[in-house]
Image: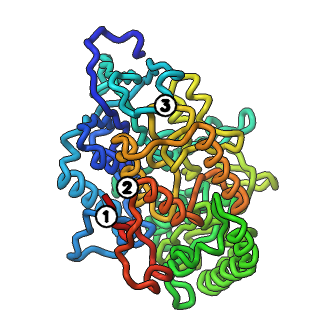
């Protein structure tokens, strides 16, 4: 489409940011001295919080762990776990306070990107070479007119979630087309207001496919819409079980004590660790397994997982290491006790005209089937990037190699923010945006391509050894070490905290660092 656009003079600027979600506005704020242009395809900031949240969606972590370092949450009447609307208000306040909104061009969809630089010459020298090396085609307000821009540097912040649905593959003539009821993905359900969502679910035989956070919340909304004797049950089709937690306290101890302190991360492997630390990690492996068992014992006591056949076969630590730990909606199992939520474990299923059929030849009638099956973030990126860069997005491991979680070693003058998950994705995006700002301002230099690739490979190998779900690209078990390396690049080495007990055993935050000029 971009090639057939009308001819318009190319507009030239230094930095382009694609996407105005949490990562996009964090990057825009940290790079504001370069006056970046932010292209946002929708009419609002917030990303998935704005466009892919249910009426009941709440923050999964405590709000103090989802807070910009220079913009605290207002204290008045704010709950510990804010709703998606409260989070949006916070993000809007942040963007307004730092004048980020002035750099955002809403309803502006990037439809094509071209590289015009010389890869051999550009390399990884200056990130702002003085002349545009990327051409970006933008479609505004759904018009047929394309405007081309030239940029020296592009920051991709479109994220892994919320745009392109991941749809299961079905045998021939057993897909959604044979089903007489309604089939939708959570990306479509998110667009419904409360009244429309209730109307869709009330009095209907609903099947929710998936057992992660979006599926759990959806099943809960379905149960609430079907209260009373005439209400129908919601069936959750569970393919892969994951551990869920009711809150962030384990046998009376705060959850951060187990995984989010410096002392706790000594029991986990991390990239670039020396021989002494490798031996220490090996010696402490029983403790690592013991902590996982300790948490599992609490979850099995607190939640009726065994009663409903929902106990995962893998240890809890593997879900933590892959950022798949989810908070169970309040009163979820109360609805299961009332028969409003039922569970069906199945690795394979397909449609028939009145519902869905399983590999054990059982059938389930349904009026509505909602696919809580996730999103295809790689496909979203591949629709943007040209060759040969498109083919470089992932290793054979299935993970995109990103140095410091930000720079692809083989793609010059481009950064990716928001693609590596951690304990707090907002903190990660903010810290990496600070690092990116330092890189663009030549406060430090990137190592060689070989060294960057070697570092990303080490991180991938650590993730592989930590969890079978490593393809989610989560660094939670060594996130403090990762942050240390970023802060070292920036020259931040002095501690604000004076109490060593707090430093070693307290919850970790990047606010613990002070900048050293």
Rendered residue at 35%/22% (across/down): 132
Q: x, y (%) of residue 12?
A: 27, 22
Identified at 45% across, 63% down, the residue is: 424
Report which residue position mark 2 lands on: 430
Front of the two marks 2 and 3: 3
| Residue ID for mark 1 | 69
Local crowd at mark 2 within 10 Å, few (<14), some, or many (≥20)?
many
Secondary structure at numbered mark 3? loop
Provide residue 298's location: percent of width, then percent of height: 62, 85
Which disc, if any, is residue 412? 3
- Element at badge 1? loop
Q: Are marks 1 and 2 in contact (CB under 8 Å)?
A: yes
Residue 459 visible to the viewer: yes
Residue positioned most to the front: 517
Q: Tell me the crowding category of disc 3: few under 14, some 14 to 19, or many 20 or more residues within 10 angstroms, Cα based.
A: many
The answer to which image quadrant residue 180 occupies is top right
Q: Along the polypeptide, which appears first: circle 1 or circle 2?
A: 1
Q: CA distance from mark 2 to mark 3?
A: 22 Å
Q: Closer to the camera, 286 or 222?
A: 286
């Amino acid at each position: 489409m971009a090639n057939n656009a009308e001819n318009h003079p190319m507009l030239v600027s230094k930095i382009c940011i694609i996407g105005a979600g949490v990562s996009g506005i964090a990057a825009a704020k940290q790079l504001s001295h370069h006056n970046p242009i932010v292209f946002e395809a929708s009419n609002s900031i917030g990303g998935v919080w704005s466009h892919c949240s249910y009426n009941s969606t709440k923050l999964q972590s405590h709000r103090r762990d989802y807070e910009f370092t220079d913009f605290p949450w207002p204290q008045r009447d704010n709950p510990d776990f804010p709703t998606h609307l409260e989070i949006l208000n916070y993000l809007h306040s942040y963007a307004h306070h730092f004048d980020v909104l002035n750099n955002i061009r809403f309803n502006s969809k990037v439809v094509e990107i071209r590289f015009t630089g010389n890869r051999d010459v550009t390399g990884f020298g200056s990130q702002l070479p003085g002349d545009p090396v990327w051409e970006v085609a933008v479609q505004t307000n759904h018009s047929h007119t394309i405007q081309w821009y030239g940029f020296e540097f592009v920051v991709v912040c479109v994220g892994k979630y919320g745009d392109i649905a991941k749809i299961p593959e079905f045998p021939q003539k057993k897909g959604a087309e044979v089903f007489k009821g309604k089939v939708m993905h959570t990306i479509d359900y998110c667009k419904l207001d409360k009244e429309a969502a209730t109307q869709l679910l009330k009095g209907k035989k609903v099947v929710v496919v998936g057992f992660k956070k979006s599926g759990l919340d959806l099943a809960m909304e379905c149960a609430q819409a079907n209260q009373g004797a005439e209400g129908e049950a919601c069936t959750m089709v569970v393919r892969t079980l994951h551990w869920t937690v009711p809150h962030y306290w384990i046998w009376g101890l705060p959850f951060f004590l187990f995984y989010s302190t410096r002392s706790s991360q000594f029991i986990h492997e991390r990239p670039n660790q020396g021989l002494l630390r490798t031996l220490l990690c090996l010696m402490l492996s029983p403790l690592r397994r013991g902590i996982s068992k300790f948490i599992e014992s609490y979850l099995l006591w607190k939640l009726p997982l065994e009663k409903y056949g929902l106990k995962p076969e893998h240890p809890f630590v593997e879900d933590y290491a892959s950022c798949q730990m989810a908070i169970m909606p309040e009163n979820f199992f109360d609805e299961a006790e009332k028969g409003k939520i039922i569970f069906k474990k199945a690795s394979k299923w397909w449609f028939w005209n009145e519902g869905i059929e399983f590999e054990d030849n059982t059938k389930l009638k349904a009026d509505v089937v909602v696919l809580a099956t996730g999103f295809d973030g790689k496909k979203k990126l591949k629709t943007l990037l040209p060759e040969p860069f498109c083919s470089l997005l992932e290793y054979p491991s299935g993970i995109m190699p990103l140095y410091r979680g930000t720079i692809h070693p083989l793609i010059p003058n481009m950064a990716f923010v928001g693609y590596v998950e951690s304990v707090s994705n907002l903190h990660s995006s903010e810290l990496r945006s600070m690092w990116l700002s330092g890189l663009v301002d030549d406060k430090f230099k990137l190592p060689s391509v070989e060294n960057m690739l070697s570092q990303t490979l080490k991180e991938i190998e650590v993730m592989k050894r930590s969890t079978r779900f490593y393809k989610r690209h989560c660094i939670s078990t060594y996130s403090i070490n990762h942050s240390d390396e970023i802060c070292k690049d920036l020259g931040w080495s002095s501690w604000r905290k004076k109490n060593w007990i707090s430093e070693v055993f307290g919850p970790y935050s990047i606010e613990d660092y002070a900048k050293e000029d």
